Amino acid sequence: MLNIAFKEWAAVCEALASGRQSLILRKGGIHEEGGTFRPEHARFWLYPTHFHEQQQEGIKPEEQALIQAAEVVRPSFGFVRISHFVEVTDVQFCRELDDVLKLDAEHIWSEATVRQRFAYRTPGLYVFRVNVFRAEPVEIIDRPEYAGCKTWVPLAIDLPTGGAQPAARR
């Protein structure tokens, strides 16, 4: 059972689930506790967010189909579809932009997005290496306390991880 979720663009969640992406880059949301992101959890559900324009501009042109793939499985308004969780195998904080740019083949973000996230507030980005698992999809109510620009969302219920299978890998 697991009740912690990680908010991420829906297209990135699709990339992780399909094996097109093997890591997560994170600076943190505007409303992080204490104003700073911390890699607090080693296991968490992927909580897809749907900001179409932001995602369209923020991912590589050749990965644009992932936006439509995420829309196909998007639930009705007021619900969130939870279907994949990750286990973090390594976390690093990269203080040099070149170190992050070298990871280009492992994610779908555009170079402009990586540069923007790296430079936001203070230079640097967390890099989470992850293994992704597919579980039985569940649609949960998108509660008001889940809203906002934050990364970690404590879900109101524990969701079962039993029977989950490794997601596709490149």
Image (tube, rainbow, N blue to C red):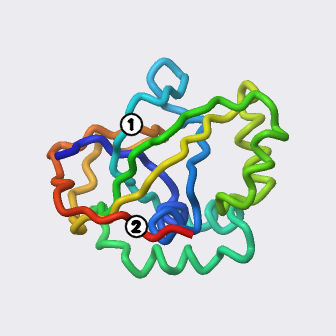
Alpha-carbon distance for marks 1 and 2?
A: 17 Å
In the structure shown, which secondary structural element does the residue marked by tag 2 occupy? loop
Residue at 73% of width from left, 68% of height from top?
60
Q: Which mark is residue 80?
A: none
Snapshot quadrant of residue 96:
top right
Q: Position of residue 62 (x, y in %)?
A: 72, 77
Q: Position of residue 123 (x, y in %)?
A: 76, 28
Relative placement, left or right, of 169 versus 47 is right
Q: Residue beneath label 1, please? A: 42
| In-front residue for pair 4/139 | 4
Residue at 50% of width from left, 67% of height from top?
169
Residue at 55% of width from left, 34% of height from top?
91
Looking at the picture, which amino acid does disc 1 mark? Ala
Characterize the local packing of mark 2: few (<14), some (14-19) or many (20 or more) Cα atoms within 10 angstroms.
Answer: some
| In-front residue for pair 137/164 | 164
Snapshot quadrant of residue 142:
bottom left
Q: Position of residue 127 (x, y in %)?
A: 61, 40
Relative placement, left or right, of 58 versus 130 is right
Characterize the local packing of mark 1: few (<14), some (14-19) or many (20 or more) Cα atoms within 10 angstroms.
Answer: some
Residue at 17% of width from left, 52% of height from top?
159
Looking at the picture, which amino acid does disc 2 mark? Ala
In the structure shown, which secondary structural element does the residue marked by tag 1 occupy? loop
Q: Residue beneath label 2, please? A: 167
Relative placement, left or right, of 26 versus 49 is right
Question: Is 159 rendered above or below residue 52?
Answer: above
Question: Is 73 rendered above or below residue 137?
Answer: below
N-terminal of the pair, mark 1 or mark 2, is 1
Question: Is 132 rendered above or below residue 97?
Answer: below
